[in-house]
Image (cartoon, coloured by chain):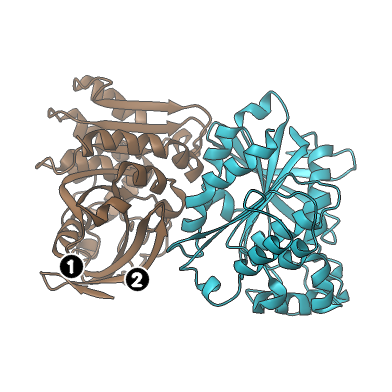
Chain colours: A brown, B cyan
Amino acid sequence: MLVTTMSGTELEKVSSSKAFGGDLVKYRFKSAALGGLDASFNLFLPANASNAKVPVLFYLAGLTCTEDNGAQKGNFLGPAAKEGIAILFTDTSPRGAGIEGEDDDWDFGTGAGFYLDATNPKYARHYNMRTHIQLEIPQILETAGLPIDLTRVSIFGHSMGGHGALCTYLASKSRQYRSASAFAPISNPINAPWGQKAFAGYLQGGIDEAKEQYDATELISRHSDPVHILIDYGTSDGFYKAGQLLPENFHNAARQAGYDEMQVRVREQEGYDHSYFFVSTFAEDHIHFHANFLKA
Amino acid sequence: MLVTTMSGTELEKVSSSKAFGGDLVKYRFKSAALGGLDASFNLFLPANASNAKVPVLFYLAGLTCTEDNGAQKGNFLGPAAKEGIAILFTDTSPRGAGIEGEDDDWDFGTGAGFYLDATNPKYARHYNMRTHIQLEIPQILETAGLPIDLTRVSIFGHSMGGHGALCTYLASKSRQYRSASAFAPISNPINAPWGQKAFAGYLQGGIDEAKEQYDATELISRHSDPVHILIDYGTSDGFYKAGQLLPENFHNAARQAGYDEMQVRVREQEGYDHSYFFVSTFAEDHIHFHANFLKA
């Protein structure tokens, strides 16, 4: 089924499955932000979306994932159905840009877009996940007439997607998002190998450019507006132990910037690892956290 | 980590992830029932298993699946943790038997063991999933000293696994299982293409042999002991519409055998398909159903 949006973009309904009384629908469209490539997302609409517009929570997945991982393994749909909240699951990078070396590494290129807008000319035409998520998808939802209330939007994610959620939230000037949360986020990527590699590749200005928009610890340290942030990470997470996540750095920067436990809550979860078993355990908590603000 | 069981079988702990306060552990062992091949299963142990033995619910997955699908996508772990019930996720066939043609089809051979004991000599050494699940794995749990109460066991499954759960339950003479449930089960396989193909391949006696032990509709029609069975299927399930599942046949046979709604409940779920989105929607219901009997 093709839905032609007001802007002329065709939104194709790829598949649909009923879930928890609502529907999980996969959509595809030609993404201008991603240089004209096909982009897919999954949208869970709870049953109440057939009567009125519903709030939406964007979910950003981690390295190597697609728009499917969170929808299938996250344990988000049941709690979202109960709260009457839509969830939008994005992809993690453009697909098939054809850039040399793009598919060589699992932590850079395909499946590893790091939720930024690339400035290195080699990637700048296609690797613009920040714009794709923050501007393009909301516009598509609006023009396609989907029953989403774009004045009530929050954002969360896992690992690289936790980085994406925190940075997109904190860098947004217009209070576009009401709250942000993250499972095991890459919290201070300028000081971690994954982030350093990504920024050196995607950004012409490297780390210095990343500090401005793409490092949650840097962003919170310069922030003064009220925030609503929840972070969980597990003490048995191998990437945490390897220094890729650095949630303490974010936590400390938030406290130094004057944010208390009510505004920035960072929880250490004993014995949990980096997998979706960890994510699914705390999924309901995160949905309830966002519901506080989305339904306020 | 290797645990040598009393029978001399070595049970290898492959991986472990904390989930919902408990642990999901993958084990591997050399399976006598499967002709000496390595067999894997996932065992979810709720937190209370550290204090006392817990009841266990066996989950049998569908065609093409492994022991991982239900654990990752089924939405079973949260409800099981709340109820204090272990879940054991089995594989769907032997792996790597090296039989000619075994990997040619998605609905026969590897990933499609149909939860039977093969009598066709070509498959009889390796394709013995019935014995593997009903006898071998419980023995392994017992001898390895895992905190499972084998007097409190129930069984459920999806699609081919629903077939496996219903037939293993109904064919068990010793009241080994307290209850059985199924999501979109292949309910009358002797009258469906998948079942006919499987029985023609695995069983020397073909359909006639299958009638004795491997067709839930045949089994319930000859059954007289009390039963506790719950079945859900979706009206938008393509395999249901194609006549592969035939839940009405099972339902009718149960009613003709004198079982009422309290003993055999078959629920048609409007608009749901065959996917794990359907399974996960009704997962909590099924866990609660089994908890009634496992915790009685």
Crowdedness near tag 2: few (<14), some (14–19) or many (≥20) residues, C-alpha within 10 Å: some
- B275 is higher (above) or lower (below) than B58: below
Q: Earlier in the sequence, mark 1 or mark 2?
A: 2
Q: Residue A141 appears at what percent x and percent y?
A: 19, 60
Left or right: B132 in relation to B249: right
In the image, B191 versus B77, the foreground residue is: B191
Which residue is tagged 2?
A14
Which residue is tagged 1?
A32
Specify the amino acid type for callout 1: Ala
Q: Chain of mark 2?
A: A
Q: Residue A197 appears at what percent x and percent y?
A: 34, 49
Q: Residue at x 69, y 72 (%)?
A: B189
Quarter of the figure that contains the N terminus of chain A? bottom left
Question: Does dot 1 land on a helix, a strand or a loop?
Answer: loop
Quarter of the figure that contains the C terminus of chain A? top left
Please identify the quarter of the rendering in which residue A192 is found: top left
Q: Residue at x 77, y 72 (%)?
A: B98
Q: Which mark is residue A191?
A: none
Left or right: B104 in relation to A206: right
Mark 1 vs mark 2: in front: 2
Task: Tell me, yes or no, if residue B44 can be seen here.
Answer: no
Q: Residue B271 appears at what percent x and percent y?
A: 42, 64
Q: Residue at x 34, y 39 (%)?
A: A287
CA separation in Å, label 1 and label 2 = 19 Å
Specify the amino acid type for callout 2: Val
- B47 is higher (above) or lower (below) than A99: above
